[in-house]
């Protein structure tokens, strides 16, 4: 029956995509679609996934931002599908709490708020007071385990049939995402695992002044319920008021979020794999709050080394080395022409290093490259699905606050500051490469500084020329220097 429901919701959209390829499904020229058509269909896709319930809302988050699998309009639309599920009735939440703890919430807590502060796809969060401390209790949605298991089985059957008929890289990539979701979601629905992840990540950031990981109330850990320290704050993408008041510096915020994930990925090897703005908040004192540890992955040492090699290649603008990293990371489809992958690496680097552009220009460039990338022989392996989501999070956060945001410009000084920790983590027994990657980064920083300096000189010269042509006093000549001020 669930198969029928899923097909009823998604088959019309699938047929619409097929018609884009063949006007009469089995023959005819491609149907022409406008941007408005795609945006309208993307909204319809989001509505259909939301109607299918928690499994598809959660799964859609893995596809959000995946413009290597979906056209940009659809990938962007899925970013709005962050836990858009209605709250569970209070009586059902109380029943789960009673079954897990043997007592109703009124007896367990000094105060229990009936209205949830968050209703996520798999769990629901209520604020409470326990042993004189403000806490939150996260409760698994009743019946969600059976529903997710059935939805995963049906989704795998459907994508298996599609892949047999249409085995292209995008379908293969979709299957990889579904497989990764199936492998991780059972662990995410066991809150004992989430508690262990939270404890491990909190220990890794012990002493970090700018990071706040909620403390787990260990006597209150259960399979379907979990109590944690309450960490009040605002979502990282809803800080415009604080920015206007000068309470938050956007550049520092983005840098700290990027460093947070860089430490988890490259230094600790324990990675928070559910990165979206709802799981990243900022406290009143400026600390970054990381929430929801249900989906955490361990990053193998060799994978971390390969990722660092790819990052250094991007910083050096070395297309050949970046293409080699694509192969080492398992991104390249078997049998792909190496020259094609080299051209892809060069194309991506040319966009990644664009500077001093407006947000509209950055988005235009990205769309042009993605339009090509959609047909490249590249498939993101399961182990990198979550890293792609992190890249989308940081890119979205950066452009939200700074239309000139450049991820590489931010990543370079962060990699430089973390170089000793990264190398010590990657080579715990010694044997570090003879060429210190830090030197490569330092050289890249010098190159970036020279570019910025040249750009500044050109801007000042342009201003002077404009002022002279208008026969107006030169404001840059009258302005005192930084030293004079």
Image (cartoon, rainbow, N blue to C red):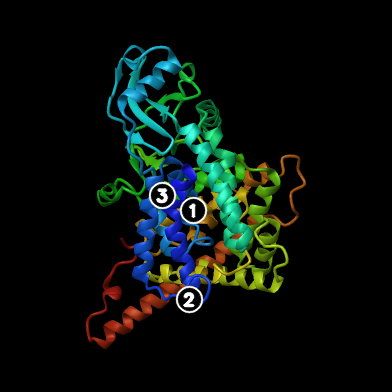
Please, which residue is most extreme toward the left here?
Answer: 472
User: Can residue 391 be seen in the rendering of this structure?
Assistant: yes
Residue 479: image location, x then y, percent? 28, 69
Give whichever of discs 1 and 2 has the lower sequence position: 2
**Above or below 106: residue 90:** below
Residue picked out by circle 3: 49
Badge 3 density bin: few <14, some 14–19, many ≥20, Cα 10 Å? many
Residue at 34% across, 66% down: 481
Q: Nearer the viewer, mark 3 or mark 2?
A: 2
Left or right, residue 327 beside residue 251: right
Residue at 38% across, 41% down: 281
What is the C-alpha distance between the residues marked 1 and 3?
Answer: 12 Å
Give whichever of discs 1 and 3 has the lower sequence position: 3
Badge 1 density bin: few <14, some 14–19, many ≥20, Cα 10 Å? many
Residue picked out by circle 1: 63
Give whichever of discs 3 and 2 has the lower sequence position: 2
The answer to the question of whether label 1 and label 2 lie on touching residues, with beta carbons closer than 8 A, is: no
User: Can residue 80 be seen in the rendering of this structure?
Assistant: no
Residue 110: image location, x then y, percent? 31, 14
């Amino acid at each position: 029956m669930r198969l029928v429901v899923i097909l009823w919701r998604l088959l019309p959209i699938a047929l619409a995509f097929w018609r884009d390829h063949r006007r009469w499904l089995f023959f005819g020229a491609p149907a022409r679609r406008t941007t408005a058509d795609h945006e309208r269909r993307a909204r319809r896709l989001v509505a259909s996934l939301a109607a299918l319930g928690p499994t598809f809302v959660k799964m859609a988050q893995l596809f959000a931002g995946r413009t290597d699998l979906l056209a940009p309009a659809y990938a962007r639309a899925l970013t709005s599908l962050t836990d858009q599920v209605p709250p569970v009735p209070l009586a059902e939440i109380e029943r789960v709490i009673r079954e897990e703890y043997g007592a109703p919430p009124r007896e367990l807590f000094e105060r229990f708020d009936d209205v949830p502060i968050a209703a996520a796809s798999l769990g629901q969060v209520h604020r409470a007071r326990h042993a004189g401390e403000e806490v939150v209790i996260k409760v698994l949605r009743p019946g969600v385990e059976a529903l997710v298991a059935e939805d995963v089985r049906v989704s795998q059957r459907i994508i298996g049939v599609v892949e047999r008929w249409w085995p292209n890289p995008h379908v293969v990539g979709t299957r990889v995402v579904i497989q990764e979701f199936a492998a991780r979601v059972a662990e995410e629905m066991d809150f004992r695992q989430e508690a262990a992840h939270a404890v491990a990540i909190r220990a890794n950031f012990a002493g970090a002044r700018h990071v706040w990981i909620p403390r787990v109330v260990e006597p209150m850990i259960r399979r379907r319920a979990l109590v944690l320290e309450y960490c009040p704050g605002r979502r990282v993408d809803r800080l415009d008021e604080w920015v206007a008041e000068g309470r938050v510096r956007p550049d520092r915020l983005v840098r700290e979020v990027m460093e947070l994930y860089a430490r988890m990925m490259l230094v600790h090897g324990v990675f928070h794999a559910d990165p979206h703005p709802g799981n990243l908040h900022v406290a009143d004192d400026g600390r970054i709050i990381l929430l929801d540890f249900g989906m955490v992955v361990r990053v193998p040492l060799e994978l971390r080394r390969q990722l660092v090699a790819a990052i250094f290649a991007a910083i050096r603008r070395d297309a050949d080395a970046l293409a080699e990293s694509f192969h080492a990371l398992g991104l390249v489809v078997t049998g792909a022409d190496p020259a094609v992958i080299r051209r892809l690496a060069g194309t991506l680097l040319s966009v990644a290093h664009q500077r001093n552009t407006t947000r509209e220009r950055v988005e235009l460039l990205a769309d042009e490259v993605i339009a090509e990338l959609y047909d490249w022989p590249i498939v993101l392996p399961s182990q990198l699905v979550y890293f792609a989501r992190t890249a989308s999070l940081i890119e979205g956060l950066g452009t939200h606050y700074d239309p000139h945001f450049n991820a590489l410009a931010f990543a370079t000084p962060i990699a430089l500051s973390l170089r000793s920790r990264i190398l010590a983590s990657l080579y715990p027994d010694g044997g570090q490469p003879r060429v210190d990657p830090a030197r490569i980064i330092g050289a890249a920083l010098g190159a970036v500084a020279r570019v910025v300096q040249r750009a500044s000189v050109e801007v000042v010269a342009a201003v002077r020329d404009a002022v002279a042509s208008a026969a107006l006093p030169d404001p840059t000549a009258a302005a005192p220097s930084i030293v004079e001020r």
